[in-house]
Image: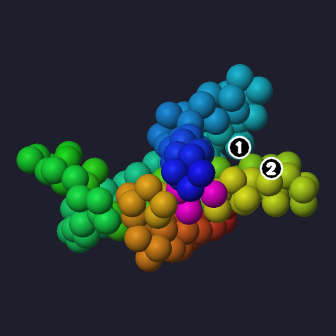
Amino acid sequence: MTKIIKNIANIFFEQITVFGGFFFYLLVLGSCLLLNEIELFVNLFLSLFFVMAFSILIKLFYFKERPKKQKKTNLFERLDASSFPSVHAMRIFSIAFWLSLFFNNIIFTVYCFAIAILVMYSRIYLKKHYFVDVLGGIFFSGIINILVWCNI
């Protein structure tokens, strides 16, 4: 019975982690364009740009192994194999932040951040990150989002 529960948990967290992925973020950006929500698109786009640029800069100068080590034979694999900060956490926090501001609805905000917490936990559960990597992702994403929000 515990093996079945563990398999279900593995499948669940492998699926939920997708919401912090790059392609899901692009899907959200594309939806903003289709719905002609240009301001939301710009805010999300700028956040993604700075999240990616900042995380690459950190990972270029500070390498931290993932809990489940990955092979790294070139620069791109080395960047991908670096655990700090969690880019999934940065992206999902950005999505939750901007959608919460846009919809301005407490129930939707709770829903967005509940999904974000599940995504962040999935990164730890799947042994992609340590807790501090996820916290770092939230912290840096928060700073980036506030700076974009203030038009700095």
Q: What SS does tag 2 mark?
A: helix
Image quadrant occupied by the C terminus: bottom right
Labels 1 and 2: the sequence-earlier one: 1
Residue at the bottom extreme, as displayed? 132
| Side of 145 relative to 90 (left or right) | right
For this rendering, which residue is in front, 36 or 132? 132
Examine the rendered structure and indicate whether residue 63 appears above or below residue 43.
below
Residue at the left extreme, as displayed? 73
- Write down the region rendered in magenta: 118-122
Q: Residue at x 48, y 60 (%)?
A: 125
Question: Does the magenta run of residues contain 120?
Answer: yes
Look at mark 1 in the image and give the residue it sits on. Answer: 40
Residue 141 image-quadrant placement = bottom right
Q: Are marks 1 and 2 in contact (CB under 8 Å)?
A: yes
Q: Amino acid at mark 1?
A: Leu
| Side of 104 relative to 127 (left or right) | right
Look at mark 2 in the image and give the residue it sits on. Answer: 102
How many numbered discs? Answer: 2
